Amino acid sequence: MFRPFAYVALAAALLTAPAALAAPGVSSVKPADLPAGHYVLDNKHAVLTAKLKHMGYSYYTLRFTRLDADFHYDPKSPEASKINVTIDPASLDTATGADAFGLKFDKELTGDGWLEVAKYPTITFVSTSIDVGDGQHGSVTGDLTFHGVTKPVVLDVTFNGVGSGMIPLTTRTGFSAMTSIKRSEFGVGKYAPLIGDEVTLNIEVEFEKK
């Protein structure tokens, strides 16, 4: 049923809405404009890819599809932020499907001699310090626990901005990050150096303020 008064009321509300109801998208690339609070990962807009050299011919790329993360932020002391990340190594996805024998490459890489996900079901990263750099580009140092081994790593981080989400009055922010590790240092050295030992990790994530 057509309800003209309802539409008029909605139009009036939109016309008189505060600035917080601005169009969704990035409104600032200044970390100081990111409101204080607790931010949680939007899993639908998060990806971790890993790239390593394959016999010198190419850089083979795979991804992990299940990860979780959160951080607490105060623009008055951004260096005090604490970031926690958990990755499910069983979510490794090579997008190759099964071979002629019906075997899946994903299964091989998550099995014995590689990630051994039955024995090591999680990969974690916990930040230990933050260098805010120039504000938009900085670094995050933290402890990476992978395949039962914990080592410090440094993420080069870009702050992509803060703004509104698709839902009015929500706050969204996003980051890009990268680092590289030697897999042999974490006990996953199979076929190295024929299959590259150095693995480049690229991270694209969006967070929502709770």
Image (tube, grey):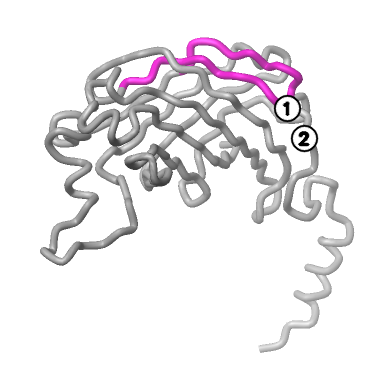
Quadrant including the N terminus: bottom right
Q: How far apart are marks 1 and 2 (CA)?
A: 7 Å
| 5 relative to 112, above or below | below
> Residue 102 placed where, x, y %?
13, 64
Task: Give me the residue at 69% from left, 37% from top.
Answer: 160
Residues rendered magenta in the picture: 127-145
Q: Is residue 144 magenta?
A: yes
For the residues carrying marks 1 and 2, which lies nearer the camera in this image?
1
Q: What residue type is labelled 1?
A: Gln
Q: In this view, does 12 lie to the left or right of 205?
A: right
> Residue 14 placed where, x, y %?
82, 61
Q: Quickly name the residue at label 1.
A: 136
**Most common SS among magenta residues:** strand
> What mark, if any, has residue 29 been given in the picture?
2
> Residue 106 placed where, x, y %?
24, 50
Q: What residue type is labelled 2?
A: Val
Q: Are marks 1 and 2 in contact (CB under 8 Å)?
A: yes
Given residues 105 and 152, the one toward you in this image is 105
